[in-house]
Image: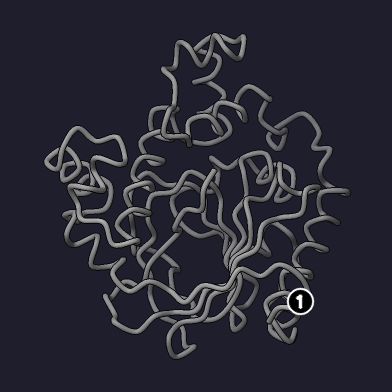
Amino acid sequence: MGAQIHSVPAVVSAEPCEVATRAASPELRPYVLGYAGFRSCHGRPIPHLLLPLAYTTVIVDFGSRAGLVHGARAAATTRGETTWGHGVSVGLTPLGTAALLGVPMGELGGGAVPLDALLGPAATELPGRLGAEPGWAQRFDLIERILTGLRRTRGGAQPGPTAPPERAVVAAWQRLQRADRPSMESLAADLNVTRRRLERGFRQHLGLSPATVARIARFQRVVDRLSTGAGPSRAAADSGFADHPHLARETRAMAGLTPTELAAFLSTPPVVANVQDGRDR
């Protein structure tokens, strides 16, 4: 699964933000998609437009009380708590959401959930601890240690509302992120389950249908192409849309924007650093 864009500043700006990224350790990769550090052009909190996304995102602004958790969503939004300026974000898979946060991803839709509501009072220490670290690598190291501890203490979720999704649901979610996604019939057959069972598992654990997950993944491929400077027609062709009008219908439905308007939000690429180890800053 390639990198996807959680949000963009709600006001188009010519000033780039700073972004640092790092992949999760092998132990955490079934649960964690990766880490990103962010800093607005002036370091102060700014409102964001949250883009359609099919996974959970934890946002910890260094000036926040405890951090926010955003679930998957099929449409862009500026509603709720969408303001931050300098901090860290973590992408969680459906399995990671259940195992690390103790809730199914589908229960997080419809707005931001305070991180301390899921992890308890200890989450209120996280912004200060992360902000006190000298660089992105050290912040990512700290997040890794915290999540590894959570996995070891909470990873064996008991049957009930926090039980992890079954393997077929996780595998189907991963496959639907790909450009060559199969039909639901062939996907269910490959995973040796019925289509109905897959759809029921998606509704229960993700709060989204398989078709919606695939639709979001295609939208995110457009976002990726537009962010690299491709024009709308090129982005449509590269992302599996029949033509530019087809793309225009989808961007209006999912983001309330035309392809050109969406491209404007992505026209100022961030300054990106890929953080590998504790020597990077």
Residue nearest the viewer, comparing 255 with 98: 255
Q: Which residue is farthest left?
A: 245
Q: Is residue 2 above or below residue 147?
A: above
Give the image quarter of residue 159: top right
Residue 251 image offset from top left, x and y in percent: 23, 48
For this view, does 261 lie left or right of residue 192?
left
In this rendering, position of residue 27 left or right of residue 54? right
Looking at the image, the residue that sits furthest to the bottom is: 42
Q: Quadrant of the C terminus?
A: bottom right
> What residue would you read off at disc 1?
138
Question: Where does the image place residue 275, in percent across and percent down from the top left?
Answer: 66, 70
Q: Is residue 105 left or right of residue 101?
A: left
Which residue is rendered at x = 49% and y = 12% of the image? 195
Q: Quadrant of residue 24?
A: bottom right
At horizontal 49% and vertical 77% (from top left) the residue drawn is: 84
Report the residue at 68% width, 25% height from top: 167
Can you see residue 122? no
- Depicted 264 relative to depicted 235: above or below: below
Q: Quadrant of the N terminus?
A: top right
In the displayed structure, 229 sits above or below 217; it is: below
Q: Is residue 185 visible?
A: yes
Image coordinates of residue 272 in percent, x first then y, are 51, 72
Q: Position of residue 29 (x, y in %)?
A: 71, 46
Going by the numbered disc 1, the residue's amino acid type is Gln
